[in-house]
Image (cartoon, rainbow, N blue to C red):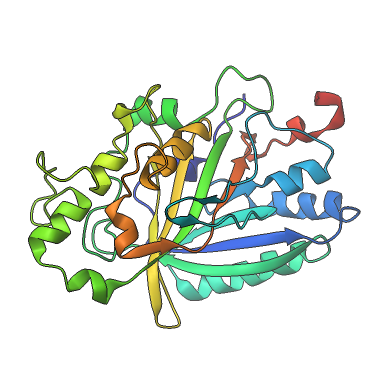
Amino acid sequence: MSLYQPGILAKPVPSQARYLFFSLKSVEALPAALDALSQWVDGKSVVAGFGSPLVLALGAKVPGLRVFPALNAVVENPSTQHALWLWLWGNDRGELLHRSVAIEKALASAFNLLQATEGFLYNTDRDLTGYEDGTENPLDQAAIDAAIVTNAGPGLDGGSFVAVQQWQHDLNGFAAYPQADQDNMIGRRLSDNEELDDAPESAHVKRTAQESFTPQAFTVRRSMPWIENGKSGLMFVSFSRNLNAFEVQLRRMSGMEDGIVDSLYSFSRPLTGGYYWCPPLKEGRMDLSALRPASR
């Protein structure tokens, strides 16, 4: 029986991580590269996501997978869709570096590494603003129901979809706001993480209230802060059984639903955006049977 990659739901997020983003270089070299990749991906120390460019290059189709949309209405949400995304878990930055270099070398015949970004655990799973991240995540069976594909057939059951956006914060700008204004922008009190009933409609919590959508838009967020070359922010990572749940939230955040833009955009902006399919596991290895021509 196929199982989901355990890192999708494992708690807590790792103390250290690396995010690797690859473009496709050679279709002919793909079979050997994917065989090499399967030696690394165990779903926990390395979580893998396949982008639409990779799936299409294999002549396959994963129902529900698509390219990340560029939503540029009131605010800008860029699409930087890559072929392959890897999330490396660990506790030692040096070990993660050496592991990512080894993976890059193993995949070099078919993939180009375009971005490698370090993530880390801050306090008790907090964003660099100090506010707790993922408070409304579903738990236990509800998390499985929200994040994992079921009843789709062999090679698809146990899979998941993930939306990845790298957000860059203006922490100095955010710190300049009075504490009450910061709380209203997030929709929670920093002091006790309690939700503010009287927060403005632009508050991030109100913009993304998962139960307020029809159908309800539950996802499992596994985001981590990042710091690089004097810049910093949040690598937003959201797993779901389909991509619609994330996308309706992003559209509302961007003001495309009712014209109200999420206050998050007043001190942060997304630099990237990509959608990926995380294949299930079978006997501890990626089950890529859904990508074989005979399975279509």
Task: Residue 74 in the image: state x and y as whole percent.
Answer: 42, 52
Task: Name the spot of residue 221 as percent of width and height, x first.
Answer: 39, 45
For residue 21, which quarter of the picture?
A: bottom right
Quick check: 117 above or below 293?
below
Q: Is residue 41 left or right of residue 9?
A: right
Residue pictured at 14% horizontal, 42% vertical: 195
Q: Which residue is at 15% across, 52% downward?
A: 184
Q: How many marks?
A: 0
Residue 42 makes an appearance in the image: no
Q: Is residue 205 left or right of residue 18?
A: left
- Quarter of the rendering containing residue 197: top left
Q: Quadrant of residue 287?
A: top right
Seen as rendered, the residue at the extreme top is 151
Q: In the displayed structure, does residue 110 sit left or right of residue 77?
A: right
Q: Can residue 252 be seen from the camera position used here?
A: yes
Q: Nearer the viewer, residue 219 or 199?
A: 199
- Front residue of 202/97: it is 202
Q: Position of residue 193 (x, y in %)?
A: 14, 49
* Quadrant location of the N terminus in the rendered image: top right
Q: Is residue 123 above or below residue 149?
A: below
Residue 149, horizontal then vertical, whole percent: 55, 27
Q: Residue at x 69, y 67 (%)?
A: 113
Residue furthest to the right in view is 28
